[in-house]
Amino acid sequence: MFPEYDIIVVGAGHAGCEAAAAGAKMGSKVLLATMNMNTIAQMSCNPAMGGVAKGQIVREVDALGGMSGIITDQTMIQFRMLNKSKGPAMWSPRAQSDRMRFAEAWRLTLEQTDNVDFWQEMVTGIEVEAGKAVGIRTSLGITIRGKSVILTNGTFLNGIIHIGEKQMGGGRSAEKSAKGLTEQLIELGFEAGRMKTGTPPRVDGRSLDYTKMEEQFGDENPSKFSYTDTEPLATQRSCYITYTNPEVHEILKTGFEKSPMFQGRIQGLGPRYCPSIEDKINRFADRTRHQIFVEPEGWNTVEVYVNGFSSSLPEHVQFEALRKIEGFENAKMFRPGYAIEYDFFPPTQLNLTLETKLVENLYFAGQINGTTGYEEAACQGLMAAINAHNKINSKEPFILKRSEAYIGVLIDDLVNKGTDEPYRMFTSRAEHRILLRQDNADIRLTKLGYELGLADENRMKAVEKKIAETAEIIAYLNNKPIEPGDINNMLVELCSAPIAEKQRAGQLIKRPNVEIEDIAKAVPAIGEYLSKFKKDSVEQAGIQVKYETYIEKEYAMAAKMSELENYTIKGKINYSDIPALSKEAKEKLLKVEPETIGQASRISGVSPADISVLMVYLGK
């Protein structure tokens, strides 16, 4: 009935979709197994992609040849570049998406991708022979053979939904949980844990009074995620901001005695950076109000996502409290918020390829690894598929360094440090974030994607053109003299000191208040010259000129740190036999089994002194 597949992907969320698309584009025969074909790429929580650090990840996925950026561009209803008041290392693209169109676009894309087959059914087990994953078993007792298996089960593994004192099995609202896989993986020797996440109520937008809220517009000149020729938005839908108040808080407190979180019915840890509304009121008792983002779920639907009001309190308490929020006085609820508890597998059980250490050719990606967020899941699915394809075709593993991509930071953190709470990416996690900007993901990664067979020739030509144009503009700016009479009026307007003699344009752009656009506006000849180039190339040149010194320092630091990556740890080492290592270092090194000294140095609990001991031992 079934052929043998190269890659079997279990789960069709954001990790599963990227994994299926990537594996197929690279030439593998892929089966995407999902419990429900109608919920492929479902946005289970907020209808948005990107945000701080997450937007950089989507750009990186796109630069490598993944699909999340393209799908987002095709289906977004608003675009904003966050943190524009800060330096470019902090700029982060974010899109409000049309939930239904996003899922539809992903499904149609996969259906039109050669080498992707589908199977709708619960997967209850992995076929393992001689320590290798060789296929899957389904609830109907069907065995499907595959050379590799990627598990992207999201919140479905033994998922339990909590609303007040009510509990029900489920991986998402109105969808059943997945049974059998956790139990088998534990039998195989894997360590499992529980995590928790939540979602807010959805309401009828027709019942809200937007005149009482602050309107949040999209960018005046919206950008996009993909480096391909996707169309930027011509029109946008607004989001809105309102606030809770003391009366809302008092009503919510009446449900605390029935809260599954406060009463201990939820064992899993929730995301620290996205707490429920009851958790916010409890932890920040001195705050009289909390911000609520009112987000439309699409172009035409009236459904609204109440961002900032995630809750697992009884539904009547949620409803009563909602109606005390300004603008929500007559709100009609579509469904209440809920918490969901699910199984995950600590990611220290993985190699940097996302292949499990216990079972060969078995890969984990997404929330099964303890992460949270569509973007974090998508990049893991992409990386797992790349490595699964390379492994079965006897090619080298594909591992991104921390200095190459946020994706590299994320996977390195997970494998070496693990996580006991849902892991979310932040710019602060990346020590080389000035190198890992959203504007240069294509320059950093497209060549790698092209060599993998993911990014096509058009993408490669586009990035080569951008690199050439950027270099040409930089050379021009660093050599173009500007007379004081041409620029001083503008410098004074920008609160920057006027010049007494002519200076090169590049030197002026290095000033804090002066941007390349200002120079182009003040000096028509420069403006006319820059108008010949694409906007992205001009922006890239401006950033590289302004931050040249910082970028050079970062590259030097990255090169110094990468020297440790060249110290390979060959063979299996019994760290217990190295007496000078600390007890904690022995335990962590035995558990993680690092491949290089650099990786060993980033393991939580391994000190610089332990690294020195290890280097002496290996030198002998």
Image (cartoon, helix red, strand yellow):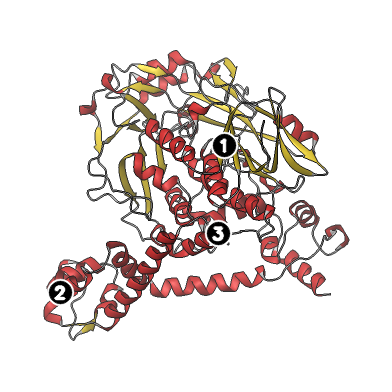
| Separation of residues labelled 2 and 3 (CA atoms) | 44 Å
| Residue 612 image offset from top left, x and y in percent | 74, 70
| Separation of residues labelled 3 and 1 (CA atoms) | 22 Å
Q: In this figure, which residue is indicated by the disc labeled 3?
A: 452
| Separation of residues labelled 2 and 1 (CA atoms) | 58 Å
Q: Quadrant of the C terminus?
A: bottom right
The residue sitting at the right extreme is: 577
Query: Is residue 596 among the parts visible in the rendering?
Result: yes
The residue sitting at the bottom extreme is: 501
Query: Is residue 290 among the parts visible in the rendering?
Result: no
User: Is there a contact, CB below 8 Å, between mark 3 and mark 1?
Assistant: no
Going from N to C along the chain, the mark reached first, 2 or 1, is: 1
Q: Nearer the viewer, mark 2 or mark 1?
A: 1
**Does dot 3 land on a helix, a strand or a loop?**
helix
In the image, residue 446 sits, relative to residue 42, either above or below, namely below
Give the residue at x 12% y 78%.
486
**Does dot 1 land on a helix, a strand or a loop?**
strand
| Residue 530 image offset from top left, x and y in percent | 22, 70
Q: Nearer the viewer, mark 3 or mark 1?
A: 1
* Circle 1 crowding by C-alpha within 10 Å: few under 14, some 14–19, many from 20: some
* Circle 2 crowding by C-alpha within 10 Å: few under 14, some 14–19, many from 20: some
